[in-house]
Image (cartoon, rainbow, N blue to C red):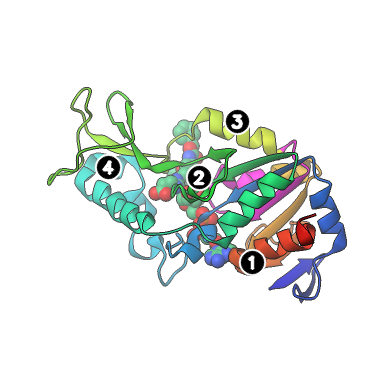
Amino acid sequence: MWLWHNGRMSDLDLVIPPQLIARLRGARHVAVLTGAGISAESGIATFRDTATGLWARFNPEEVATLEAFRRTPGFVWRWYAERRQVIGGAEPNAAHRALVELEARVPAFTLITQNIDDLHRRAGSRNIVELHGNIHRARCLDEGTRVESWADTADPPPRCPDCGGMLRPDVVWFGEMLPLAAINAAFAVASSCDVFLSVGTSGTVEPAASLAYEALRSDAVVVEVNSEETPLTPSATYVLQGPAGEVLPALLAAGWAGGG
Ligand code: BV8
């Protein structure tokens, strides 16, 4: 693991800057934004890993859009059904669990996720803002009725139990508005927190990608946890470069060694 601080890189095994730990321990309100990278160590492909990423095989406009669903509802439904199956077989990893522990140790904590895999809730996180919906929910394309279960059909998508219309995944597609309550909450938290962690996100999809800059503008300490550099790296207050499943437990251990 490597630490980037003011452009200097050092081996994280040696030190996590005491001033970062002090800010974390003294934080009133910690906000965390997560992306697909936090679920990578649970075996779930990220969007942009070229070898295995979901983008590698499908262009997002081909699948994650309302137009694609209207054009080929069965294909889009099956793409989500395949992802739901992979996610169903995955478990939260050490990074998800470290955020559950962090939530218990700070006065106020908000977890903002771009992920639709529900692993934060399964890990035990409580104050979660789902920016892009949840793959385990569906909703009626015509009247918006939300359902948590449905009878699978040989000719997907399944139908709305109320009106018989097509069910669609209850996720935010490209070109769709985010849930207003979620995006308003996320920006309110980004502008009022004193520590903002950006974990496992390439920061390329808007409006989620703007949250870290909102936190910087509001004088929060912004910490990036990512296995690679991203557009945020030069602007973050601290960059802890490494797998989230190692970095986040190390951050917790350094901040609350001995459970203090
Ligand atoms: C909106 C849910 C406006 C679905 C997702 C042209 C046409 C249309 C829209 C646009 C356009 N140009 C720009 C836009 C806006 C668009 C956008 O941002 N496009 C991008 C591609 C440029 N945004 C939208 O469309 C949004 N809506 O703008 O509406 C509007 C206004 C008025 C009226 C109507 C509409 C909606 C965006 C939401 C799309 N839905 N997900 C689904 O999942 O199928 S987006 C999806 O992709 C994710 O949710 C996430 O947000 C994004 C992927 O990003 P990441 O999570 O960061 O994942 P990625 O693979 O990129 O990166 C992984 C990172 O982890 C990497 O940095 C890697 O290094 C790191 N990593 C890997 N392993 C580890 C690790 N880090 C730590 N540890 C590890 N082990």
Q: How far apart, in angstroms, are the residues tagged by discs 1 and 4?
A: 34 Å
Q: Which residue is mark 4?
A: 69
Horizontal side of 66 relative to 2 (left or right) equals: left
| Label 3 CA crowd tier, 10 Å (few <14, some 14–19, many 20+) | few
Region in magenta: 191-212
In the displayed structure, would residue 58 be above or below residue 146?
below
In the displayed structure, would residue 8 be above or below residue 204?
below
Q: Which residue is mark 3?
A: 184
Task: State which tag comes first along the sequence, 1 or 4.
Answer: 4
Q: Is residue 62 visible?
A: no
**Labels 2 and 4 touching (C-beta < 8 A):** no
Q: Which residue is mark 2?
A: 121
Q: How far apart, in angstroms, are the residues tagged by discs 2 and 4?
A: 27 Å
Checking the image for residue 124, the label placed there is none
Q: Is residue 194 magenta?
A: yes
Task: State which tag comes first along the sequence, 3 or 4.
Answer: 4
Q: How far apart, in angstroms, are the residues tagged by discs 3 and 4?
A: 27 Å
Q: Amino acid at mark 3?
A: Asn
Q: Which residue is mark 1?
A: 229
Q: Is residue 178 magenta?
A: no
Task: State which tag comes first along the sequence, 2 or 4.
Answer: 4
Residue 187: percent from left, percent from top: 65, 36
Task: State which tag comes first along the sequence, 3 or 2.
Answer: 2
Residue 14: percent from left, percent from top: 80, 75
